Amino acid sequence: MKVNSSIYKGIQFVQVNALPADQKDKLLSTINRELLIKILIDGKLVGNCLQFKDYESWFDNFYQSDQTINRNSKVLQNTTENQLVSFAMKSTS
């Protein structure tokens, strides 16, 4: 599920550390680290931020498509297993 963004002084962003664990791990292993930014919020430097447009692009083009491939792979595997069981049952009849 796509996370909501935060906005500070017109900068729309997400904090990578606040993402669900699977998204955080995949994002950090696939994006260009130069896209990560630091934002000074009330005198505190907040690191590991990503502009929301970059997160959204990554989510739509990589993460979501990766999830679809995984789901389709599981469906195909289950279908193949069911066909093998059905074939084995017919062969023993």
Image (cartoon, rainbow, N blue to C red):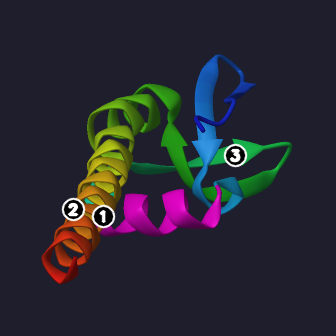
Which amino acid, by three-letter code, is at mark 1? Answer: Asn
Q: Secondary structure at mark 1?
A: helix
In screen coordinates, is 18 left or right of 72? right
What secondary structure prevails in the magenta region?
helix
Residues drawn in magenta: 20-29
Q: Earlier in the sequence, mark 1 or mark 3?
A: 3
Within 10 Å of the Cα at label 1, are there few (<14), some (14-19), or many (20+) other Cα atoms?
few
Q: Residue 77 appears at what percent x and percent y? A: 26, 64
Give the residue drawn at x 60%, y 38%: 1
Give the residue drawn at x 40%, y 63%: 26
Which amino acid, by three-letter code, is at mark 3? Answer: Leu
Q: Residue 51 appears at what percent x and percent y? A: 49, 34
Kindly check if marks 2 and 3 are in contact, taking CB atoms under 8 A apart as contact: no
Q: Which residue is mark 1?
A: 82
Give the residue drawn at x 27%, y 56%: 79
Q: CA distance from mark 1 to mark 3?
A: 56 Å
Most foreground residue, 91 or 66? 91
Which amino acid, by three-letter code, is at mark 2? Answer: Gln
Q: Secondary structure at mark 2?
A: helix
Residue 81 in sight here: yes
Query: Where 92 falls versus 58 (above or below)?
Result: below
Q: Which residue is mark 3?
A: 40
Residue 32 in sight here: no
Q: Is residue 63 magenta?
A: no
Q: Which residue is mark 2?
A: 83
Query: Where 8 falls versus 87 (above or below)?
Result: above
In screen coordinates, is 19 left or right of 22? right
